[in-house]
Amino acid sequence: MSLLVITQIFYIAIALECNQTQYIKNGICIDCEKGCKKCENEIGCVSCEDKYYFLSNKCLKCDSHCTSTCEDGYGCRTCMPTYTEKNGKCIAPPCPFCAENSCNLTTCSLCIENYYVSKGKCVLCDKNCKNCDVDGCVECKLDYHVSNGRCQANTLASRDIVFISIGSLLGLVMCLCFMMIGISYIKNIFKRAFFHEA
Ligand SMILES: *[C@@H]1O[C@H](CO)[C@@H](O)[C@H](O)[C@H]1NC(C)=O
Ligand SMILES: *[C@@H]1O[C@H](CO)[C@@H](O)[C@H](O)[C@H]1NC(C)=O
């Protein structure tokens, strides 16, 4: 066998060890470009990872403000409210998520639905909020309470802890009572059986 054949076999053996997200070059596994799920060689990708789209042999990250799945060969088609779609990307307005005519330079005074103003910016209402208005959350879902316009999980109140403690204590006392009754009953049976006491 010629040296060439031997090196070829060697390369192929190594190639089998390469990952799907790698390609082989001169017997070495090289990682595909970022966002690429499968690549054939250094020329480019064959398919992209989730949240990436294919454009000119590359995998580009889908815009984080995109509300659709990015389309191969183009990118994003629909963006979040107030954002403008341009060439597959989402362009941010001066005041993101701000209501119409409520933006002064970069300061918003009134936000679109489901957002509220905090220090001149629009903040998304808390996901645990039941009723959100211009100042933030006014009513939270069960087991949450309002704190600075957001919803915080309730912790056990000290009053609840007192009730739980009293309940446990009563349970324990009752348990002991039944145990003592049981023991004296068994004791009586033994006494009657072995000592023939009345
Ligand atoms: C393949 O990927 C795994 C995890 O992603 C990594 O641990 C392993 O080293 C890779 N194999 C090669 C040959 O690079
Ligand atoms: C915009 O904001 C600036 C600075 O806070 C203020 O001076 C100006 O009056 C505002 N303009 C409008 C139209 O509210």
Image (cartoon, rainbow, N blue to C red):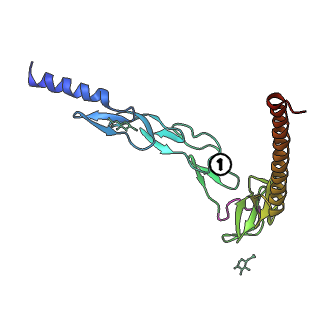
Image coordinates for residue 155, horizontal then vertical, percent: 75, 58
**Residue stretch in magenta:** 94-100
Residue position marked by numbered label 1 in the rendering: 79
Q: 10 above or below 166? A: above
Q: Residue at x 56, y 38 (%)?
A: 71
Residue 163 horizontal side relative to residue 98, left or right: right
Image coordinates for residue 104, horizontal then vertical, percent: 71, 72
Q: 148 above or below 41? A: below
Image coordinates for residue 154, horizontal then vertical, percent: 77, 58
Given residues 10 and 65, the one toward you in this image is 10
Mark 1: give few (<14), some (14-19) or many (20+) Cα within 10 Å. many
Q: Is residue 197 visible?
A: yes
Residue 78 magenta: no
Q: 105 above or below 21? A: below
Q: Is residue 56 visible?
A: no
Q: Quadrant of the C terminus?
A: top right
Residue 36 horizontal side relative to residue 131, left or right: left
Q: Quadrant of ligand 2?
A: bottom right
Q: Amino acid at mark 1?
A: Cys
The yes-or-no answer for disc 1 within 8 Å of ligand 2 is no
